[in-house]
Image (tube, helix red, strand yellow):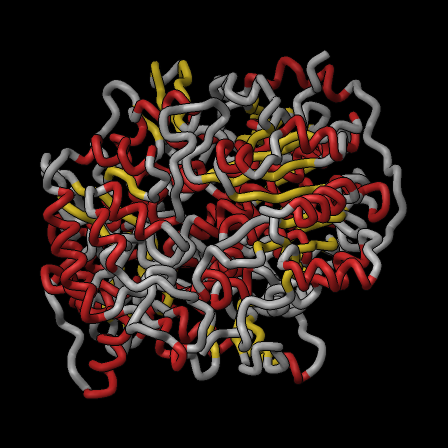
């Protein structure tokens, strides 16, 4: 018999508006939950075709929550629901009579999710009208947007990507599912996910700072930035001059058809050689230096190694020139097929619109065709997370007419209210969960480091000989592998494979970031995993996987490959001729790891009901869809894809724009009040009658006459906002607390960064604290420092029953290992 859909037993009340709340509801509906969208009179606040996509699989009920009848009906629905979602400013639901206390009084088993812009405990920021761009501006998303724009001196720079809502929604969907699984212990729970906190966590790798960071890990662009800062030189390079600072194995090349092709083959052993061979440059591949990247630099036999990024200065220009000439020999689509077959990370640069009609996107289910009653044949972003054996995952019911659930309301209210089955403990939602982590880089490891904060026991298994260079494994791993134990096993040996299989046999979850073909090559087919452990859940992340197979399902890729393939780079750079990697590192990687946690939460919930394991999946391309949700749809007659794009963009019209005040840059957001907002401010009232085409310049001139603090105060308490544009650097500095100072409070401020000044690296390291998810009852732990790779190999092997003598023998034979390098971070 087919298994039930993962969340078919769950009812969700979606009070959310705009993006963050509706995104959570969409994710849960896509996994089979019954989601009732609670609409105000007049319908959803977001008047966009995106609302049709966000409403798929949901039904609609119109309630006036400000009326006694509407409130009474809402509370009766709460008594018969499992989850509620809202993303209003702190206090709004309380004033309506639907705050956490009122929800719990109606239903002690309810899991309520709140997604405010800023933390409710933050007196300075909680009252701010937290529009998407306001959150982005305050947190630092618009500042220092990548190495290119810093070298060009472009700051600030607006992007329409709704990263705060996307990160927050993914954290929120994950948290509600984990909390559901712990209801028998903890009872119901209220969870707050401030979108700004989620955004900072999503950008953690841009906030990471390591004391006395070795220069060997700096790219040519970073070195040039440091040089200009040291020598007091301006950052004013034109885009055309940036090319000489790009790594040959990490950049876009022009092909015979004039299209761009992005190569991301740096930092992984064997990838640069494969790239050169795919280009027909076999002799060059054999001639380049290739030695252990984990040696300290003083022991290097050459200036650089093919196993270590970046390419040395003397070879960078020569290699790039040869590769540029080779790429001009074929059109980009041919190169995509060649690189995919050769297992080299590379992809054609596409626009968002091209991706929505791409053969692989459609074949794999990463893009869906939905017959929408308003839009016709509508192509939409596919699932963010799914289970491999959920055959109904792609059968999308479009969002129906307003109030279509009213006919079912009497039947719903006739149901027996939910009852509380558990107690009121305060435990980690995932305490007792055992995870074997076989991942590397960022997206995959994010799964393990995330579940560790909720109490899971995670063992990271890496190879005895590293395939990833120290920058990708160590400097990124200090966050990605927090809270784990580390063991090194040689899976090319019988003994190493036997040890891994024993670990899997005793685990609840196995995580992998690989394609299906790579997993099969490791001998870990789905059938083999089930034979080892019938109830195990495999969580798998790859680059281009979807619910079905497609032409690119086995193509390799990393964050930037997904950006290039799904349209992010073209959007950010401003066109097909000028694609740029989205400024902030880990843009897609982190959210892909969190999306995998959503899939895991659904798989755990289904296993709790049925006892069956399964395969929980997401992909980088699915995450690339998610961060473009406001425009990830197409249909006949759709308006042009004219969202703000390119490096000179400062906003989206005069009422949603970066302006320079007397003392600093600020963001003005009045997307709904618009001219009403101007009339409310005496200094701006006369501009309310200004013609639209003149208004931007008029506002710029007026805003320049006063400082930011004055303008911020002028709109305080309204549904519009002005906020100073922050930077990630400043946000980090203001939020920093040292580990050695004692217990760290995660719940009060919107932002929190921890200086780990007792780190086993021997240097202090600044990392964003795990405070995006704030439950009332569930416990959140600051994960322990990522250990040196192999530090717990002996402990892990003893834990599966191996005697000390056998452990010593495995280490002596290279079947296991306890270190990759002398120093935690090779110097």
Q: Nearer the viewer, residue 609 or 257?
A: 257
- Whether residue 66 is visible, yes or no, is no
Give residue 508's quadrant in the image: top right
Q: Nearer the viewer, residue 68 or 631?
A: 631
Whether residue 476 is situated above or below residue 2 in the rendered picture: below
Where is residue 14 drawn, in percent x and y? Answer: 59, 34
- Furthest residue in direction bottom, as rendered: 231
Query: In this image, 257 relative to 185: left or right?
Result: left
Where is residue 81 drawn, in percent x and y? Answer: 73, 31
x 63%, y 29%: residue: 526
x 16%, y 54%: residue: 695
Give residue 27's quadrant in the image: top right
Where is residue 56 drawn, in percent x and y? Answer: 49, 24
Q: Quadrant of the N terminus?
A: top right
Whether residue 639 is situated above or below residue 171 in the rendered picture: above
Q: Quadrant of the C terminus?
A: bottom left
x 76%, y 30%: residue: 534
Whether residue 195 is situated above or below residue 575 in the rendered picture: below
Q: Nearer the viewer, residue 563 or 641?
A: 563
Q: Nearer the viewer, residue 207 or 48?
A: 207
- Whether residue 481 is visible, yes or no, is yes
Query: In this image, 83 relative to 383: left or right?
Result: right
Query: In this image, 457 relative to 332: left or right?
Result: right
């Amino acid at each position: 018999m087919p298994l039930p859909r993962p969340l078919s037993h769950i009812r969700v009340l979606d009070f959310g508006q705009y993006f963050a709340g509706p995104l959570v509801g969409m994710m849960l509906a896509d996994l089979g939950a019954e989601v009732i969208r609670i609409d105000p009179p007049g319908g959803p606040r977001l008047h966009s075709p995106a609302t049709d996509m966000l409403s798929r699989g949901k039904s609609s009920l119109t309630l006036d929550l400000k009326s006694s009848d509407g409130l009474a009906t809402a509370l009766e629905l709460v008594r018969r629901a499992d989850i509620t979602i809202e993303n209003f400013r702190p206090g709004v639901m309380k004033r309506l009579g639907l705050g956490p206390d009122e929800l719990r009084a109606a239903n002690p088993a309810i899991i309520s999710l709140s997604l405010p812009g800023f933390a409710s405990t933050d007196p300075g920021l909680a009252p701010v009208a937290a529009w998407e761009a306001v959150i982005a501006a305050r947190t630092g998303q618009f500042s220092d947007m990548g190495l290119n724009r810093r070298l060009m001196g472009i700051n600030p720079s607006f992007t329409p990507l709704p990263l705060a809502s996307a990160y927050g929604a993914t954290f929120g969907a994950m948290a509600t599912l984990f909390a559901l699984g712990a209801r028998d212990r903890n009872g119901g729970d209220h969870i707050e996910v401030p979108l700004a906190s989620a955004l900072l966590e999503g950008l953690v790798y841009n906030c990471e700072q390591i004391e006395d960071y070795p220069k060997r890990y700096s790219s040519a662009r970073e070195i040039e930035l440091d040089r200009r800062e040291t020598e007091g030189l301006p950052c004013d390079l034109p885009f055309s001059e940036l090319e000489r600072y790009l790594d040959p194995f990490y950049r876009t090349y022009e092909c015979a058809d004039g299209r761009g092709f992005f190569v991301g083959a740096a930092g992984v052993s064997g990838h640069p050689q494969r790239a050169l061979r795919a280009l027909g440059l076999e002799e060059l591949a054999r001639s380049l230096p290739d030695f252990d990247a984990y040696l300290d630099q003083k022991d290097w036999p050459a200036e650089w190694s093919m196993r270590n990024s970046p390419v040395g200065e003397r070879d960078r220009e020569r290699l790039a020139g040869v590769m540029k000439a080779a790429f001009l020999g074929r059109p980009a689509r041919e190169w995509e097929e060649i690189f995919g077959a050769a297992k080299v990370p590379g992809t054609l640069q596409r626009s968002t619109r091209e991706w929505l009609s791409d053969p692989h996107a459609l074949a794999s289910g990463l893009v869906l065709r939905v017959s929408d009653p308003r839009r016709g044949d509508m192509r939409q972003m596919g699932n963010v997370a799914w289970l491999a054996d959920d055959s109904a995952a792609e059968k999308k019911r479009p969002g129906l007419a307003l109030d279509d659930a009213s006919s079912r309301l009497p039947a719903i209210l006739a149901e027996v209210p939910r009852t509380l089955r558990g107690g009121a403990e305060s435990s980690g939602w995932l305490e007792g969960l055992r995870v074997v982590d076989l991942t590397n880089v960022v997206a995959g490891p994010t799964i393990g480091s995330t579940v560790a904060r909720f109490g899971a026991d995670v063992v990271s298994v890496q190879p005895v000989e590293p395939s990833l260079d120290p920058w990708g494994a160590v400097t990124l791993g200090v966050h990605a592998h927090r809270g784990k134990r580390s063991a090194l096993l040689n899976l090319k040996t019988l003994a190493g494979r036997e040890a891994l299989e024993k670990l899997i046999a005793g685990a609840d979850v196995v995580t992998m970031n690989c394609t299906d073909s790579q997993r099969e090559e490791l001998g870990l087919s789905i059938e083999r995993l089930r034979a080892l452990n019938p109830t195990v859940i495999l969580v798998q992340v790859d680059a281009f996987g979807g619910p079905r197979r497609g032409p690119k399902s086995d193509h390799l890729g990393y964050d930037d490959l997904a950006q290039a393939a799904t349209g992010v780079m073209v959007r950010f750079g401003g066109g097909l001729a000028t694609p740029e990697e989205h400024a902030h590192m880990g843009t897609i990687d982190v959210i892909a790891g969190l999306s995998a946690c959503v899939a895991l939460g659904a798989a755990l919930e289904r296993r709790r009901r049925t006892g069956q394991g399964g395969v929980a999946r997401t992909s980088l391309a699915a995450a690339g869809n998610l961060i473009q949700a406001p425009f990830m749809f197409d249909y006949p007659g759709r308006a042009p894809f004219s969202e703000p794009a390119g490096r000179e963009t400062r906003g989206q019209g005069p009422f949603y724009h970066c302006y320079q005040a007397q003392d600093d840059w600020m963001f003005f957001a009045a997307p709904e009040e618009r001219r009403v907002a101007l009339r409310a401010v005496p200094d701006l009232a006369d501009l309310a009658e200004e013609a639209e085409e003149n208004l931007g310049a008029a506002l710029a001139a007026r805003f320049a006459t006063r400082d930011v603090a004055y303008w911020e105060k002028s709109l305080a308490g309204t549904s519009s906002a002005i906020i100073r544009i922050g930077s990630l650097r400043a946000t980090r500095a203001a939020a920093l607390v040292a580990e050695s100072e004692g217990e760290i409070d995660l719940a009060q401020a919107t932002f929190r960064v921890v200086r780990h000044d007792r780190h086993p690296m021997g240097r202090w390291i600044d990392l964003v604290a795990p405070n995006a998810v704030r439950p009332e009852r569930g416990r959140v732990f600051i994960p322990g420092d990522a250990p040196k790779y192999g530090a717990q190999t002996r402990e892990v092997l003893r834990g599966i029953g191996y005697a000390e003598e056998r452990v010593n023998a495995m280490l002596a034979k290279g079947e296991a290992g306890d270190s990759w390098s002398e120093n935690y971070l090779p110097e």
